[in-house]
Amino acid sequence: MDGKRPSSFYILAAVFALFILFLYGPTITIGILSFQGEGGGLTFPMRGVSLHWFAELFQQQAVGDIWGSFSRSLILGLMVMVTTVVVSIMGGLAFRKKFAGSGVLFYLVIASLVIPSILVSLGVGLIFSQSGLPVHWATSGYGAQLTWTLPFGLLIMFAVFNRFDKSYEEAARDLGASPWQTFRFVVLPIIAPSLIGVALFGFTLSYDEFARTLLTSGSYNTLPLEIYGMTTNVTTPVIFALGTLTTAFSFIVIGVALAAFMLFGRRRAKQGSDAGKGMV
Amino acid sequence: MQAQLRKSLPQAAIAWFLASPLTLVLAGFLVLPIVMIVIVSFWGATEFSIYPAFLFDNYEFLLSSRVTYAVFLNTAKYALVTWAITLVLGFTVAYFLAFHVRSLTWQVALFLLCTIPFWTSNIIRMISWIPFLGRNGIANSALISMGVIDEPLEWLLFSDFSVILAFVHLYTLFMVVPIFNTMMRIDKSLIEAAYDNGATGFQTLTNVIIPLTKPGIVIGSIFVVTLVMGDFITVRFMSGSQSANVGRLISNDIALLQYPSAAATAVVLLITVLIVIGILLRFVDIRKEL
């Protein structure tokens, strides 16, 4: 192909640029508006620039229990993340072998992904209330969120293991490694970068989850529930300040995951093949 | 042969052991809850409590109410319009990334740029439309200052328009990712062969690329359609509680503690969604696509 780009490239590039603007524009707007002056409202013009609305977030009585719900979301996110990683690895390994019921389990995973979230929320809530168990974010909420994060984790593991070169394991086995050793010292290091992806999905999907947590979190809200509650009774830019902070937090988490992913890649490149580098 | 037989039994046991946590989670938090919903959909309810029974009242009321049909129709409308827009938009974006961006680094970078919003909060992303679409929002001010309109448009926020805009904003990603994924697997020499045989760009698109991208399109469609059909929060927030869909019907019943009635609606919704997925799955074998 020659270097000159067809005219369709420029049209599509413009569409793509508009799409990116469409994706990020609103978020950037509330980012700007959260620095609204003290007398400002929910939209432009800006009446001065201030940190007033951020300061308001730190005054407990002004708006709900933000920091409590944030710490609950954080803990729950970490719980869901660890579980998602472990269960997805195990499930991914299981699906490489043939076992009775694998077809049913596979379709359950897909069903878990496409089933309307409110059904999971309602069903889990009903089971807990009818059996007399208290709904709590760390029990019923945790389980309900796993039905959302596990399918993503497993789909990543399927993709990983489909491209996995089995000869590495065979080599390990031929050299006398036990199945556990093969997994721990051969398979795990190879799939490790993808696990960062699984962890990222596990944490962020839990941290932002709303519908499946709604009826399963009990009397203590997670952050998305708290924010949703605020939308009905808070009419000041304080909600933008909260939105900006939590989006910034998400960006940090994504940034850390990407950095870890690249670090892995670089380390691997350094430690990787030494073909042609000596002993010739 | 014997050694193989002896080995194969523990292999299955190991597989079951490895699959057991997944099975337990899905059994306890997906299958049981659905079973529970089906059971409760036959229960009775007073104003304050629900009681076990085997009644068809909930279904009878649901299926004889005109509201139900109107709401299901509205839900279908949202799903169809959102599906059409996200398909065209998602396909265009994926097509640009897969065939017009030439270096892999740029492809990955731009792809990430598209997917990052997926890892941020949906609620915040909905809220962030308010300063845009409000009566005194950016869209209205811009249109007025350009002289296109004299008075602010009322239908920008809290309308069907804003609901669909939010759906497209939230869910186009679910189209882009699978379509991009299948496009990246298309052998580039097929496209060159089409050109060499004199196909125009458009002919290549319709005769080569679209057929080969079908699995991605179907998977993306399943995502978007089921997400929109099961949604209740976007419609409630973006319509300012002025429009209804099935999800809102369920959540309203829940708010009134009418769980049996909510469960009956949920069962009907589930059946509808499963039928739609069943139809879509006729076009693709998911297990082969992974």
Image: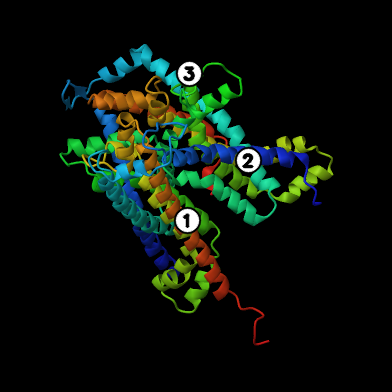
Q: What amino acid is at disc 1?
A: Gly
Q: Distance between the residues labelled 2 and 1?
A: 23 Å
Q: Do the residues labelled 2 and 1 touch (CB within 8 Å)?
A: no
Mark 2: amino acid: Phe
Give residue A97's position: percent from left, percent from top: 45, 58
Query: Split into 4 quadrants, where in the image is the C terminus of chain A?
Result: bottom right
Please give the residue where the numbered disc 1 appears in the rendered image. A255
Up/down of A49 relative to B250, above or below: below
Left or right of B131? Residue B261 is left
**In the figure, A38 relative to A96: above or below?**
above
What residue is shown with label 2? A16
Tell me, yes or no, whether the two marked residues, 3 and 2, touch with CB atoms within 8 Å. no
Label 1, residues with CA under 10 Å away: few <14, some 14-19, many ≥20: few
Do residues under tags 3 and 1 come within 8 Å of each other at their CB atoms? no
User: What residue is disc 3 on?
Assistant: B154
Q: With respect to residue A184, does B72 lie above or below?
A: above
- Give the crowd class for mark 3: few <14, some 14-19, many >=20 residues within 10 Å: few
Between label 3 and label 2, give the one nearer the viewer: 3
Q: Alpha-carbon distance for marks 3 and 2?
A: 29 Å
Q: Which chain carries label 2?
A: A
